[in-house]
Image (cartoon, coloured by chain):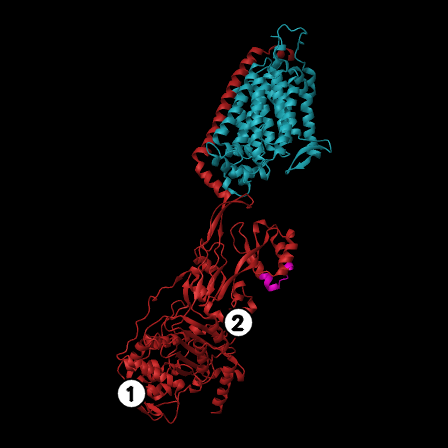
Amino acid sequence: MALSDLSRRWRPYPVKAPASGMSRRRGFWERVHLDPWLLGLLLLLMGAGLVVMYSASGQRLDIVIAQGIRFGVALGVMVVIAQFAPATLIRWALPAYLLGVMMLVAVELVGDMGMGARRWLVIPGVIRFQPSELMKLAMPLMVAAYLSRRELPPRARDLVVCALIVGVPVVLIAKQPDLGTSLLVGASAVFVVLLAGLSWRIIGLLGALAAAALPLLWMNMHDYQRRRVLTFLDPNSDPLGAGWNIIQSTTAIGSGGVLGKGWMEGTQSQLEFLPERHTDFIVAVLGEEFGLVGMLVFLLLYLLIVCRGLWLAAEAQETFGRLLAGSIILTFFIYVFVNVGMVSGILPVVGVPLPLVSYGGTSSVTLMAGFGILMAIHAHRRLLPR
Amino acid sequence: MRKSRHNLKSPEQELRIFRVRALLALVVVFSLTGLLMGRLAYLQVVQHEVYTTRSEKNRVRVEPLPPTRGLIYDRNGELLAENRPTYNLTLVRERVEDLDATLTRLVEILELSPEEAEAFRVRSRQRQRPFQPALLMSDLDEGQIARLAVNRHLLPGVEVEAQLLRYYPDAEVMAHALGYVGRINAEELERLDAGRYAGTHFIGKTGVERFYEDALHGEAGLRKVETNARGRVLRELGRTDPLPGKDLTLTLDKELQHLAFELLDGRRGAIVAIEPATGGILAMVSAPGYDTNQFVTGIDVASYRGLQEDLDLPLYNRAIRGHYPPGSTIKPFLALAGLAEGVITPDKTIYDPGYFQLPNDDRRYRNWLRWGHGRVDMERSIAVSNNTYYYSLAHDLGIDRIHANMTDFGFGTRVGHDIFGESAALMPSRDWKRERYNQPWYPGETLSVGIGQGYWQLTPLQLATATAVLANRGQWVKPRLARTLGDEPLSEPLPDTPDDIELANEGWWNRVFSGMEKVISGHEGTARRTGVGLEYRMGGKSGTAQVFSLGQDQKYNADELAERLRDHALFMAFAPIEEPQIAVSVIVENAGGGSTHAAHLARAMTDAWLLDDDEPDVEEIREEMGEDDERLAGN
């Protein structure tokens, strides 16, 4: 079926407007539609992230302030998005998705180059924007919206539609080339499908198919991507080139020991042996300066956020909300896992930042928008009829 | 159909499925987090030390601090070798973006000749540790430094570095005694202790600089510095200061050395003067000399070839490596051997008809005076340098006893204590001849040896040493150049000093001295003209060494040929006889008769050492020598 048909067929969920006179007095958090636990954990993470950022940037207060401002903006976006009911969100799904695909096509045609890849869409003097960031949210939104209207668990036909929805943007992003993001975008869709209850048989079948497709993927990879994989397998094959990053980051982490070298005392970080120390490799700074203890504290924070997120998802009353919330929180976890795994040398180097810690504007805003959605789904559930 | 599908939706089932899946996801999340934690624990606990080492290696660089080379003084504290600050051009290749372009620009800025430019390029390619500056050029002049400063922004990675460079104020005069330092070459680099020589570019190549290299060099220090990933030094973590090399005080006397050099100016030859009491070398000159400073900064190919191809062989250290037939200079030593072996007594005479004949042999071995000296005793044999007396003495002694006794005086051996590159020259023997020519020793050859000809060859250092031992009445002293090293006087007596020479009758020394005094002061002494106006008692002996043949590939013009075929003039002397303070040997190549040329120079040396006079007038001495030349030519 044509994608345009979908939007017409989807009706908004029945939403009962809140009565003007409330029967029950609602608390502050319910009125602002925020989850205090999740918000608290996120603020803790951001605060700790800024402390690490000060050291990782080489004690540059301007960078820390810029990051802080971005966090502020991201929090604002989260709060705003949290005010929308899931019914509104489901109406955004198709337009957001289509907009995203169109912008990806535009990037392909007129995008701006940066770091050897074409990822940016620029309206001169106005804005620089990565359409792939929009797609990180639009994708799970779209798939969740689609599947929530279908009978679950999903059938083969649903899967074909999902594959179509997923495939187009993933291929476009991969062509930029930005393999990391395309895989994460794809993963966010896969999570929706898995959470929707895809049968184990099909999962096994698709898994086998994916394994069979690996050589195909390899052949379509760019040289630098292949080099990253090869370097991952043996970093010492090119110690001054592609292997440099991973050797230096594992050295930084390993030399940190249990307690770390101390804040702003990490020699690997402060003496610039560590590349991209305040962006993708910031976790190495953390590991070097705060040691295993610091790493465990951060991982624990992330784990608590994921647990709270999954709890919120499970509490959601509608399938759409559940699937979307579950996908967002699992994708968030995958970010953490891929980034830490890459910096500590158990995954190949893919350009994935550490969520809410690495320096970077758009990714923080996207992430917090995701948490906004999560909170919206949770905070609005009482409005639904039981 | 579609509608019916929709009706089939079951919220309860969907919730149940989701919760199961979410729980499963949580399990996966926990196990992946566990995996990460495990990996981190592995890196930070199990492998902690490996990575700590690696991180330290990254961060800490050890930089050598080369020691300052010890200075060299003469016996009066006059500076002979110093370290002068100079400016060097260095290049850190890792910081240069385009090496070729940078080198081309440097050649322009420094205004180098094409040959210099080529040497320059070669040096820039030398293997170097990362981020270690490579030395491109030493001793920049003011103009070059200024031009480099102006163009600095165009030359990243290029630095002008201040460095101490060896400088010899009296380079030419001291060349063969002091030697010089030069850039460490590949062969030396392999042999050297890399730690001690880290950061040092120069090493003693010859002479005193070579022999005392160990002490002069000192001990390298080091500093640990923290560097960033680009190799920039951020701070010093610790340092061990280098131990500067020890200063060396020589026995040389700068004034006397200068005099010896001037006396030989324009000639080829050597003068060695020794203090008999200590063996300290007062002067050691080989002429012509050369400018050793050229070798410090790196001599250019053309100049080096010029020195090498010079017929006068300026690089050749005649004083310790020159092989000369001793001529008659060794007659006093042979006389002593005869006394020691009981072959002669001081008063025993022979009759000299002008020649000597071996039994059963018609051949006549001639005295230099065709008609003979008549009746000759030991003292007269020395004074008039009678050959017949020594033919007879040599015949009676035989080569074996001559060899043994002359070896006792150091002939045919390396006599020096701290002389680098000394030659043992040659004291012939039966064994030597059998080995060298696979021939027996012939009696006639003994006669040649008896007048210092034939196979016998000595170095000027050996002759001066033997003279000092003679002046000491047989007490051996090894010649040496160094007096004190740092604050410590060098060991006394020296190890490996040969046994003293003892005579049955101590009075015999006086008889030999008497003969040697007559050489200079006697009415028929061969060097009597040298003795005019002598203010102290001096003993000496002249010698003339025949120049045998020229090498086949040597080409001279006729004048030069004649000049270079003339005999070498030799003289040995010591003074004053009562308490000798100086023993000297002089060799002037192709000067003609030894009694005049070399004797005048020896007298000038002893005068300068013993008298408080003003500086001796070298011009006057040379003029007198010129007159003698004319007189000889007239004869």
Against A372, residue A211 (above or below) is: below
Q: Quadrant of the N terminus of chain B?
A: top right
Q: Is residue B353 magenta?
A: no
Q: CA distance from mark 2 to mark 1?
A: 52 Å
Residue type beneath disc 2: Leu
Q: Count neighbours of disc 1 (C-alpha within 10 A) and say few if under 14, some if 14 to 19, many if 20 or more.
A: few
Residue under label 1:
B347
Residue type beneath disc 1: Asp
Along the viewing direction, whichever of A337 and B489 lies nearer the viewer: B489
The residue at the point 29 percent across, 90 percent down is: B360
The residue at the point 63 percent across, 10 percent down is: A383
Q: Badge 1 sits on which subunit?
A: B
Residue B592 x %, y % = 46, 84
Segment colored magenta: B108-118
Compared across the picture, whether B396 is left or right of A131 comes to: left
Residue under label 2:
B307
Against B603, residue A68 (above or below) is: above
- Label whose residue precedes the other's in the sequence (2 or 1): 2
Q: Examine the rendering and report whether any part of residue B289 can be seen.
A: yes
Task: Supply the letter of whichever chain is cyan.
Answer: A
Majority SS type along the magenta span: helix
Q: Count neighbours of disc 2 (C-alpha within 10 A) and say few if under 14, some if 14 to 19, many if 20 or more.
A: some
Q: Badge 2 sits on which subunit?
A: B
Task: Supply the letter of whichever chain is red.
Answer: B
Along the viewing direction, whichever of B143 and B623 lies nearer the viewer: B623
